[in-house]
Image (cartoon, rainbow, N blue to C red):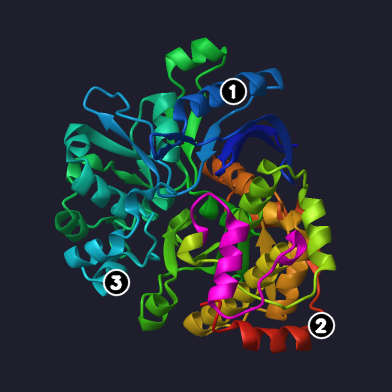
Amino acid sequence: MAKTKRVLAFDFGASSGRAIIGIFDGDKITLEEVHRFTNDPVDVRGTIYWDVLRLFHEIKQGIIKAKAAGGFDSIGVDTWGVDFGLIDEFGYLLENPVHYRDKRTNGILEEAFKRMPREELYDITGIQFMELNTVFQLLSLKMQRPHLLERADKLLFMPDLFTYMLTGEKVAEYSIATTSQMVDLQTRDWSESILEKFGIPRRLLCEIVPSGTVAAPLSANICEECGVEPVPIISVCGHDTQAALTAIPSTEKDFAFISSGTWSLFGTELDEPIVNEKAIKMNVTNEGGYGNSIGFLKNIIGLWLIQESRRHWNRHGGDYSYADLERLALEAEPFKCFINPDAAEFVPHGNIPERIRMFCKNTGQPVPQSIGQVVRCIYESLAMKYRLTFENLMDCTGKDYPVIHVIGGGTKDTLLCQMTANSCNRKVLAGPVEATVLGNIAVQLLATGEIKSMAKAREIIAHSGGVKAYLPKDTAQWVQAYQRAADIIV
């Protein structure tokens, strides 16, 4: 019988983080959560920062608790994309990483395209244009705080920054590097022309290593502080989207997926990128993944709209659970109004319900008043956006997908899963909930040879359970409503 392997996965989202042990018995993976903590951005004088030192403290707490729970053989870290820390020549962090929702990149695309035309930038990188992308964050620093870049020696993306704190090694893992919009899709390396035209110093960027590279072991001081052995750190798919993509329990080579959480990432997996007029019009992204695969996907604002609306209502005296909001949405009349979830006004923190009302008013629609009406508007708009994206995806790839896999925390939102099936007129297979963590764990096991191939990893994850099916309902009504919503949601 194969020896049981235990690996420790740290998974950071925009609002929380977890330390989870993956236990692999040769047939299936079971999960044991040992530590959970909040991830609370901090606004200081108008700039939003990640509290990276507290987050690193939580990593050490997770290591200590994982040792007490039975130990582990390796560690991997995944986080959200695009954000970074700057390290000086002496190895010190110059300032806390700035949050991608910070206003420093507002309106920067116009300035960026003066340096490199939109089409040329997309041809090189194949990455969706969003103001929050790393290249635009660096441009804002170049324009507003050039002294900071002058003092910096290395840029480390968030998972690589935590790896550096644990080991002292500075690398750029492939999947997280591609979120920067600075990687050449053809060479799989930094684009010299982008760096030159945006004035980004080449010295800042570390060597890009493949997903699944075995990095240095835990440093001696971390081992002494936490009372553990110097196990290896694995550069897993550091971008949480690509980690989740490795965990899709599909037996088919071609599949469609939605990684559902604060963001919704809708796409498929390809061997080679697609960069053409259809792709740039769709503003779709080609992100690097395990084994040099390509995650061909569209970033859509997802359950952020529900999460931030709930925070607003609860800040003003409410006490609504997500189950309460789903119940109120079901009680509201369907298909009254729609929003474009990706409209710029829905990106920042704040009063999302009022912004939704203004959007509906400005587009000549009925204005949702009650909480249930607002929540129903959000859910139905997301489902309609999914359909639009799905149609564009099939057009770009020339393929049909009979099933949509929904993975991640959003699989617990049964109303959105059912609406996705209804809107797209496809069977939805929802699960696993912990796709990102399972992907993190799978790449660790692949890196150490415990699992021999990605296909085998997905088979093992499928055996590990946790998938629920949703069949389309009321499709004629959804088709009719989509015809009304189509011009609004783009």
* Structural crowding at the residue carrying mark 3, measured as other residues with C-alpha within 10 Å and reported as few (<14), some (14–19) or many (≥20): some
Residue ID at (41%, 82%): 278
Q: Residues within 10 Å of mark 1 (few under 14, many from 20)?
A: many
**Which residue in the structure is indicated by mark 2?**
474
Q: In the image, is residue 372 part of the stretch drawn in magenta?
A: yes
Would residue 365 be found to the left or right of residue 70 on screen?
left
Which residues lie in the magenta part?
346-373
Secondary structure, mark 1, is helix
Q: Is residue 287 found left or right of 390 in the rendered image?
A: left
Q: Which residue is mark 3?
A: 123
Residue 476, image quadrant: bottom right
Q: Looking at the picture, which amino acid does disc 2 mark? A: Asp
What residue type is disc 3 on?
Asp
Q: Which one is earlier in the sequence, the residue at label 3 or at label 1?
A: 1
Asked whether disc 3 touches disc 2, contact meaning CB atoms under 8 Å apart, the reply is: no
**Residue at image x 60%, y 60%?**
354
Distance of label 3 from label 2 (alpha carbons): 41 Å
Q: Position of residue 214 (x, y in %)?
A: 45, 37
Q: Quadrant of residue 386?
A: bottom right
Q: Nearer the viewer, mark 2 or mark 1?
A: 2
